[in-house]
Amino acid sequence: MLLLIPLLPFIGFLVNASFGRRLTKRVAGAVACGAMILSFVVSVAAVFRLLSFDPESRVMAQTVYEWITSGDLAVPFTLRLDPLSAVMILIVTGIGSLIHVYSTAYMHEERDAEYARYFSYLNLFATFMLVLVLGANFLVLFVGWEGVGLCSYLLIGFWYQKKSASDAGKKAFIVNRIGDFGFVLGVLLTFVRFGTLDFQQVARSLANLGTETTFGTVSVITLLLFVGATGKSAQIPLYVWLPDAMEGPTPVSALIHAATMVTAGVYMIGRNAVLFGHAPLTLKFVAVIGVATAFFAGTIGLVQNDIKRVLAYSTVSQLGYMFLAMGVGAYAAGIFHLYTHAFFKALLFLGSGAVIHALAGEQDLRRMGGLKRDLPVTYWTFLIGAIAISGVPGFAGFFSKDEILAKTFESGHTLLWGVGLLTSLLTAIYMFRVVYLAFHGKPAAAPQPAHPEEEEPAAQAHAHSHLHDAPPAMALVLIVLAAGSVLAGYVGLGGRFEHFLEPSFAPQTAKAAADGGTGMTLMIVSIVVAFAGIGIATYYFLKNCRAAAVMAARFAGLRLVLQNKYYVDEIYDATVVQPIRIVSEDGLWKTIDVRLIDGAVNGVGETVGGASEVLRRVQTGSVRAYAASLLLGVVLVLGYYLWR
Amino acid sequence: MTFPILTSLIVLPIVGAVLLFAIKEDDAHAATIRNVALIVSALVFAETLLLWSRFNAATADFQFVERHAWIPAFGISYFVGVDGISLFLLVLTGLLTPLALLSSWESVHKRLKVFCIFVLLLESAMIGVFVSLDLFLFYVFWDAMLVPMYFLIGIWGYDRRVYAAVKFILYTMAGSVLMLLAILGLAYMHNTANGAYSFDLLRMYALPIPERVQFWFFLAFALAFAIKVPLFPFHTWLPDAHVEAPTAGSVILAGVLLKMGTYGLVRFAFPLFPAAAATFAPWLALLAVVGIIYGALVAMVQPDMKKLVAYSSVSHLGFVVLGIAAMNTQGMQGAVYQMLNHGVSTGGLFLIVGMLSDRRHTRLIAEYGGLKRVVPHLVSAFLLVTLSSIGLPGLNGFVGEFLILLGAFRADPRMAAFAATGVILSATYMLWMFQRVNYGEVTNEANASMPDLSRREWTILVPVVAVAVLMGVLPNIFLRPIEPSVDRMLALTQRSASFRAQAARSPERLALPNRGVAARSPERLALPNRGVAARSPERLALPNRGVAARSSERLALPNRGVAARSPERLALPNRGVAARSPERLALPNRGVAARSPERLALPVRGPAPHSPGSARLSAERRVP
């Protein structure tokens, strides 16, 4: 039964990949969506089955076969469903199905073959993502981990004729590989230390070990694994690929680069909660990186003009929150945020997709405006998403983000809490900036005078006259996700979500709940901050746009730094990429290989050649010369004997 | 008498070559020539599969053994057999040769008949190398293989083919001359010790060789193999040879010939000279890691696709050597597996590059671009082979790389850490090439009308991709038969105490977590070669395994090192002897045998040549 969950989308992939060219769009789309929806149904059935068990024994496993056996290493291909995996498969298949349906409309203008190729990749992605979250050991997880990376690569570069798209895909893959470098070493050390790669067995063998107060083996393992997580989940210093990944089709950004794949790092830490729990030093590091990323990405998000890039930085920032939660040991809160985030961020991306679809590919916020009237469904659903992410009470994001901040405060990390709170202010500001710039104000605002050099929008022709709102398939998905963004948070009321997940994080029993007083105060502070952020955005980007321009002028330097994303890409290029290229080309290849080694080899060759040249002169081929030397030899030999 | 399947494998391509010789060479007969060559090589492949199907995976013994006296005066015999290590190399050879022939279907017109004859002769020699159990016979095949390869590069190659061919042959000869000297030296030593010359590999395994001599012999063998692999800094012949060789030559060169170097390390250099191997293994590992990184970095900046793939081979073969030098089950098993992977994925890459250059007559990356739109099927195959080459889990490369890294990590975590950067670098250079060739707009008009895969090309690529997937998804099909043989080679290699003892002497190593595994499972300590036997008790019942198990007193010997590392064990009464003579710790256990000459006269050494059981000789001899 468990195998069926990833197998169904895989069959969809096989069908579309093999016969896609001969299928009509309708059939290709139906196959892909059907496979996903069936997988969702099976997932729901599996989760219900799981719920019917005792809370303590909620585990289902299926060993498909023995995958790799060598010496004392035995890696079975085992899938295991526990509460944590259950949450993940529901997100992946549920949100995944919705995004498949949305894509049938969004990608409709592609050629038949391209359409099938798109859906085959999307199905393949779902397969690997499900393997990732169901895998019972590190290597099976890694199959999914790398597989989703591959699909991400293929889908970011889906429009491969665009150089920027194929560059972005390649960058995503390579940056992820840098993370994998750490991850693989972490896995190796895990095996060497514990003699197994099975998550349960690792956790079990940790049971009678104390936590590491110093920087010991477990700390090293967890730190290495975390390096992998920073790659996959776009955290400092490896977050650079995610904003570029927006080159892919928007539904892909929603599914892979917001709702599911990028949360794999968070999931992986949750999966190894016991391991990480034994390494408080690593956890502290995780928390710091998480909150730093959240803040850092939030500041960049404030000034980006590409609607998808704002959302991308927002995703990086929200993932930072999840890592903060993991770092302070609030695993359930982190996963809870992962779950609510999947709804509202998918919603926001798909909403932006509807805008882009309506504007024939326009992504620049400065060329939008006043879309509220023409795209009502998109507007209202997008607004709900923005409210949800900002942390307005009653909406999904509020419950989960507030919980993370509260847990951070309770665990005594006041500074981290402060930065987290500040970030939530930023979140509200940048989200409502997008809402106001895109949907309010005058239609098709001209480009800001600050950038006169930019060419006039070619698509000015859209003139907002023939704008039409999202087609039915897209609108339906937006509405469902909007409902989810409102309601998803209520699942967590009364600690039910946390309670459900508890067996997955077993020994890390939840810390005592804060007394009502502190909890209430914290919540009120969060709410005030959320509204303050919305208020600031309303003032600057709706009521008094000139104030925004004045602010921008006053802090022009800072704005430039932020718009250029702190120049991190340029710094990486100058300090890592170029030096490696130059050393490899001029140093290793042209100097060591060609000059030194080959020079030596050819030198030996020439010396030998020179010697043989001398010998060759002797061998003239002239019979007389041979005869003469023969004679000389005879004379010498005779002379020797005579004179002896 | 059973059917001599190995001899038939060696002879079949020669028969094919003779048949070809009888066909008249003109345009009318071109198709006949191609078909005869292809059918013969396909028959060889079928026969290797037959061999595999009849192979007993549960034993480490050499199977299908044939032995006939050849030059009795010098103890030279025609002695062949396969174990799990050579089995799949034979299958690989069988698979790649017909594919290589098919790949040159439309690109080779000049002297077609001779071309086919050389390919078949090359196949015969390669098979001979992998099945030889007599050092002299091995050397004959080893050198015989050079000749057809030399001509393949020199006649059917590209512009600088003569330079490349001469460089190839000089490099290789430089190494193999020293190896010949070492082989003769071994025979001489056998004569001194036993009063008769012998080139029998199994007897050589049991020959006591003083450590100093091992040192020099190991260097001679290792140099020959290192050049063949090629290990940094002996690699510069490879890019030239690959770039100049015709596609078929590149495929066989990368797919099979390079493996002879690593195969030689596993089969000869390490088990024959365990003490020297232990001394040099860390250095080999170091060169391997340098090669991994160096090869990858240089591959990254190559403008020529073939050269890029050639340098990537340097990097990948570095992984193989690293696994061998780790001297543990996962490392060496991963190394053997990676040999096969590299043959499939790099062979596949050369086939694809060949298809592109058949169409456009250039291999420069800059000449291409935007192919995905023009030839989608070819690009899909290209993508799969690329992914297999960069070790994506689910495809073949990953399994080998992971096992090698695990083995290396156990031997020395630093080496594994540096080697693992190869994972990043390989993705970088492969994907960059892939992007420049296949993505973007079609900028070069010449690319716009390229035809997609022909039926012949489908026939070539489908098996490559299928094998890559099979080896990634079901690696155990291959790993199971490989493991006993690898363990046997390891047992021979680890007869030396010095390496392990060294480890014991450096206390900081003891603190490393990987030592901990052994420490925490004391029952394993008692077993040689870590637990493999322990975990599969049924194997203990097998004769070759049994050696270790039956000779319990051996287990007490410190030369296993594991015991050496746990001093409290040394204090136990039965360990007493060893403990009381600490100078023994440093001696290779060969030494023990050396000091008791009467052992050498054990009857087992005697005849019993024709039975597979003779393979057990060396193991039996090790029983004190």
Image (cartoon, rainbow, N blue to C red):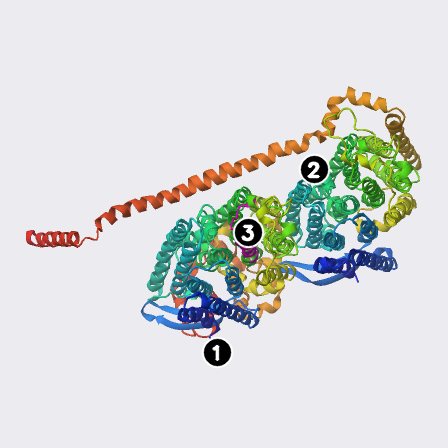
Place of residue A433 in the rendered image (x, y in percent of width and height, measured from the top left): 84, 31
For residue B565, which numbered disc appears in the image?
3
C-alpha gap between disc 3 and disc 2: 47 Å
Q: Main secondary structure of the magenta part?
A: helix
Place of residue A325 in the rendered image (x, y in percent of width and height, measured from the top left): 80, 40
Protein chain holding label 1: B
Q: Residue at x 71, y 30 (%)?
A: A564
Q: Nearer the viewer, residue A408 or B304?
A: B304
Protein chain holding label 3: B
- Membership of B329 in magenta stretch: no
Question: Mark 1 packing: few (<14 Cα in 10 Å), some, or many (20+)?
Answer: few
Q: Nearer the viewer, mark 3 or mark 1?
A: 1
**Are the residues tagged 1 and 2 within 8 Å (C-beta)?**
no
**Amino acid type at image mark 2:** Val
Q: Which residue is mark 1?
A: B2
Q: Nearer the viewer, mark 3 or mark 2?
A: 2
Question: Mark 2 packing: few (<14 Cα in 10 Å), some, or many (20+)?
Answer: many
**Amino acid type at image mark 1:** Thr
Protein chain holding label 2: A
The magenta span reads B344-365
Please tell me if label 3 and label 1 are on a single chain. yes
Q: Which residue is mark 2?
A: A240
On screen, residue A36 above or below A587: below
C-alpha gap between disc 1 and disc 2: 65 Å
Place of residue A51 in the rendered image (x, y in percent of width and height, measured from the top left): 87, 57
